[in-house]
Amino acid sequence: MNNITWNLKDLKDRCPTSLLEEADQNIKSIGKLIANNNSLTEKLLLVNSQVTMNDIIDSSFSKKQLEAEKGLKILVQDLHSLPDYMAQVINVIIVKPFAPDLIQPLNNKDIDINKIIKKLKDIKQELPIENPKYRGIESIIDYAEALINCAEYKYIIDLNNTTKHRKWIDSDYTLKLTPSSEEKSFWLSAFEKDGREYPRVSYEVILTEYKVNILNRFYSLGQERNDYFLL
């Protein structure tokens, strides 16, 4: 469960109405993406927990494995795209107000999180250090870089890019029975991307640890962006 929240009401209360209206569609898209992602997570955890010994030895297992693989692939694609949705919002409500005097905003078709970070750094260079907006933008940059550079998001990036143009990475299922407990999960095989090696990891860890850490950092970035309008 995420222990950090992002209060969208704060954003709506603090952000100028004209900017909020322009960013409204992207904000709604973020909400839908997260809601769908959470719903998919619940379904995947349910599929993961419902596999039985009988399933493993008959044809129904292949169907459940395929269902889990398809679901995880969609979830990975969604997590991969979240920062770019945030970049669209930041471009409208933070970058655009500095145009045209200080900087030009990015074209909507060209926006991703890395380009928006660079644009924020360009704005920061043009502002005097004593300007409160300088500190606000610096903080947003820090939170954005913390998100895209965390180990879990890098895993998601490389997993998504590795499987984008070829079949899904092999997975297997492990069921461990002991007198007092039962451990079971689909596992994603180890893989390598551009010299970066990733170990075999369970779907449950991706769903309950990797995803949670990414969303916590995403929400922290969103809340920091809300606080920018208090400066």
Image: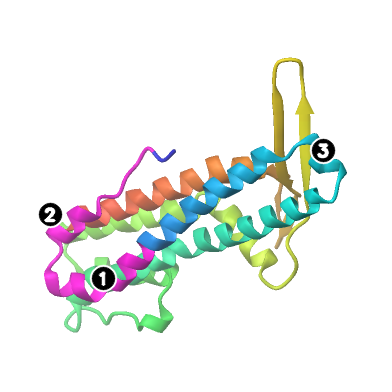
Quarter holding residue 121? bottom left
Dot 3 falls on a residue whose secondary structure is helix
Q: Nearer the viewer, residue 179 or 102?
A: 179
The numbered mark at residue 230 is: 2
Q: Which three-letter amino acid code belongs to the residue tagged 1?
A: Asp
Q: CA distance from mark 1 to mark 2?
A: 20 Å
Q: Which residues are magenta?
A: 3-30
Residue 132 painted magenta: no
State the residue position of label 3. Answer: 54
Q: Nearer the viewer, residue 220 or 5?
A: 5
Q: Is residue 214 left or right of residue 3?
A: right
- Which residue is depicted at the point 70% across and 73% down? 165
The numbered mark at residue 24 is: 1
Earlier along the polypeptide chain: callout 1 or callout 2?
Answer: 1
Q: Would residue 135 be seen by someone viewing this image from the given angle? A: no
Q: CA distance from mark 3 to mark 2?
A: 58 Å
For the N terminus, give its image quadrant: top left
Q: Is residue 200 left or right of residue 75?
A: right
Dot 2 falls on a residue whose secondary structure is loop
Residue 16 painted magenta: yes
When the figure is inspected, residue 95 is found, relative to residue 174, above or below; the finding is below
How far across and down, in percent of the image, does residue 208 sit?
A: 54, 41
Mark 1, Cα crowd under 10 Å, few <14 / some 14-19 / many 20+, is some
Q: Is residue 178 left or right of residue 114?
A: right
> Is the C-beta separation of discs 1 and 3 under 8 Å?
no
Q: Nearer the viewer, residue 131 or 220?
A: 220
How far across and down, in percent of the image, does residue 19 sit?
A: 18, 73
Q: Which three-letter amino acid code belongs to the residue tagged 3?
A: Asn
Quarter holding residue 97? bottom left
Question: Which secondary structure type mostly characterizes the magenta part of the structure?
Answer: helix
Which of the two discs, 1 and 3, sits closer to the camera?
3
